[in-house]
Amino acid sequence: MTGTLIALISILVGIIAANSFGYTVKKYSFGIMGNTIAGVFGSVFLIKSFGRLGFDPWSIMNNEDFVGLRLVINIVVSALGGVVGLILAKLLYNKIN
């Protein structure tokens, strides 16, 4: 597994988390396209923020060795980032309108 594939998987997890959260909690839904965009940006922002702590995809593939615990933490942070991105987008939308 390469670092690029891990990054793509974490973004996909953020998209799925944002869409499923928007589907279950209709208050925060922007439709499938809006939820997808919020999930991508929220996931990337949180992964880039916490990546400095050693949970980025290239730290997971440390010296040709795979660290599964870091991958699980990366996926959980990515899912939280998708949900938080959706909530922040809805708060911004309500503030502007």
Image (tube, rainbow, N blue to C red):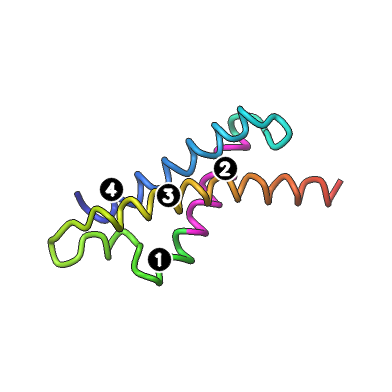
- Residue that mark 1 sits on: 51
What residue is drawn where x is 84% and y is 50%?
96
> In x, y percent, where is residue 12?
41, 41
Dot 1 crowding, Cα within 10 Å, few <14, some 14–19, many 20+: some
3 or 1: tag closer to the N-terminus: 1
Amino acid on which the number 1 mark rests in the picture = Gly
What residue is drawn where x is 86% and y is 45%?
97
1 or 4: tag closer to the N-terminus: 4
What residue is drawn where x is 19% and y is 49%?
1
- Residue that mark 4 sits on: 5
Q: Residue furthest right?
A: 97
* Pick the front one: 95 or 17: 17
Q: How far apart are marks 3 and 1 (CA)?
A: 13 Å
Q: Residue furthest front?
A: 69
Q: Distance between the residues labelled 2 and 1?
A: 21 Å
- Residue that mark 3 sits on: 76
Q: Quarter of the image holding residue 21?
A: top right
* Pick the front one: 2 or 83: 83
4 or 3: tag closer to the N-terminus: 4
Judge whether 77 appears above or below 16 on screen. below
Judge whether 59 appears above or below 43 on screen. below
Task: Check whether the beta carbons of the residues at disc 4 and disc 2 lie within 8 A of each other.
Answer: no
Disc number lying in front (4 or 3)? 3
* Pick the front one: 32 or 23: 23
Relative to 67, 77 lies left or right: right
Q: How far apart are marks 4 and 3 (CA)?
A: 16 Å
Q: How far apart are marks 1 and 4 (CA)?
A: 16 Å
Q: Magenta stretch containing residue 39, yes or no?
A: yes
- Residue that mark 2 sits on: 37
Tell me the element at label 1.
helix
3 or 2: tag closer to the N-terminus: 2
Q: In the image, which residues are magenta?
A: 34-46
